[in-house]
Each structure stands twice: as C-alpha cells, then as structure tokens.
Amino acid sequence: MRRVLAVALGLALLTPSGWCAEAQTGPEKNLKGDEITIQESGKIAQVVGQLLQRAHYKQAPLNDETSKTFLKNYFNALDYNHLIFLQSDIEEFEQKYATSLDDRTQQADTAAAFEIYDRYIQRLDERRILVEKLVKQEHDFTKDETFSTARNKAPFPKDEAEAAELWRLRIKFELLQSRLNKEKPEEAADVIARRYARLEKTMKSFGREDILQMYLTALANAYDPHSDYFSPSEAKNFD
C-alpha cells in the first residue's frame, strides 16, 4: 500500500510570517494565479522536507544524494519516456540543482519546480507543433525502421535534430497502428494531432498546487518509491 504524505496549508504557514525564499522569481507564465502563492509553496516544501527527515520510517537526511534522486524523479514525473526534454535541458538543470535541492527545500525555495515545469511546457509546445507537421507528411511504411515505446531507460534526445528524428519515428509508428486498424489516413492524422494538443492543454492547465504536488511527490519518492505527497485538496479527495 502506498504511503501518503499530506500537509495542510495551515501547517506550512506556521513558519515565521516574514520568511520568504529569495530565489522565487522564476518564470510563471503558465501558472494559474488563483491558488497558493510562491511563498506558500516554499513553506509547504520546507515542512514536507522536515517531516520526511523526522517522521518518515527511514529517517534519512535530506542531503546531496537525496537531492540528485529528487531531481531525477521530477524529470521522470514530467517526461517519463524521455521524449520531451533535451539532454541539454537535463544537464543545465543538473548543474544548477542536482546538489542544491536539499538546501533550497530547507530554505523554503521551490523555484526549481516551476522553472523546470516551464521548460517542459516550452518543449511540449515544440513537440506539438512538430507533430502537426509530421502527421501531414508522407511516410514510407516499407522501410525497415524501429521505435521503442518504452523509453524510460533511454537517454534524452541530445539536440533538436535527434528529437525531430525520434518524433518522426514515433508518429510513423502511430500512423502505422492506425493503418493496421483500418482507419482512414486523414482521420488518423487528425486524431493523433488532437491527442498531443490535448496533452499540452492539460499540462498547461496545471496550477501551482498541481506542480507542487508532482514536485514534492518526487521528493517523497526519493525516500521511498511508495510514498506520495498529496496537496490539501487532493488529500480531501483521497479521504
């Protein structure tokens, strides 16, 4: 059974009222503004970090090693099959955050959560635009090519050219599936394009609370893959 870590917003706000992380000015253009504030998200993360160290059965420290796992978990939560981010994105964020998420969490700083999410949305938009072009192209189904649908262990595409080739193969695979299912080519192309448009719309609709839930679940999973963080609203639904 999965363990659930739910922290009420009121508990997070028990920290001193003047406390505010200094690095909370990252991009937020995709975020809804009617939920928790950046400062509140930092305080919640700070309390979750404290609880994981003191109350989790492992009672392990929140240190650099935990930070590395935390960051990797967050990448995978957003992009499990390694299709959206570029390797350069991963390297950039690893250099910036791999050994500092522990300190940032304890300082009530959740800027990384929103900065990485925002980059994900940028890349997702690029992939959606590419899909719209790929579904309209002619594909040679007689050519012997392979595409692995299970890519969670595969490297991220190293650059845009490699990402474009990866997505060409993915869309060709999906179009081939539709042909085997006797679907009309025009209808199949439309269905595939709309699928990725819906994915982008869904991910763009995430508010701070949704993003924070993914982020802190990545932290909880660094302690135990069966531990989750539920936001206060999600915890109510769980009950």
Image (cartoon, rainbow, N blue to C red):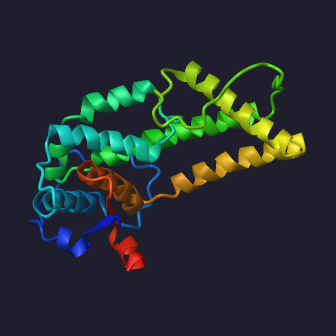
Looking at the picture, how far across and down is residue 114, in whole percent?
A: 36, 48
Picture coordinates of residue 141 (x, y %)? 82, 25
Residue at x 73% of width, y 44% of height: 193
The residue that appears at 84% across and 26% down in the rendered structure is 138
Residue 25 in view (yes/no): no
Q: Where is residue 184, by image quadrant?
A: top right
Q: Height in image: 53 above or below 173? A: below
Task: Give the quadrant of the N terminus.
Answer: bottom left
Q: Check the image and name the residue furthest to the front.
A: 1
Residue 172 drawn at (x, y percent): 74, 31
- Horizontal relation, residue 74 to residue 150: left or right: left
Of the pair 151 and 122, the residue shown nearer to us? 151
Q: Nearer the viewer, residue 87 or 155?
A: 155
**Quarter assignment of residue 179:** top right
28 horizontally vs 129: left or right? left
Label tally:
0
Question: With respect to residue 32, does 135 lie above or below?
Answer: above
- Quadrant containing the C terminus is bottom left
Q: Residue sitting at 23 percent across and 51 percent down?
A: 223
| Residue 235 shows in this picture | yes
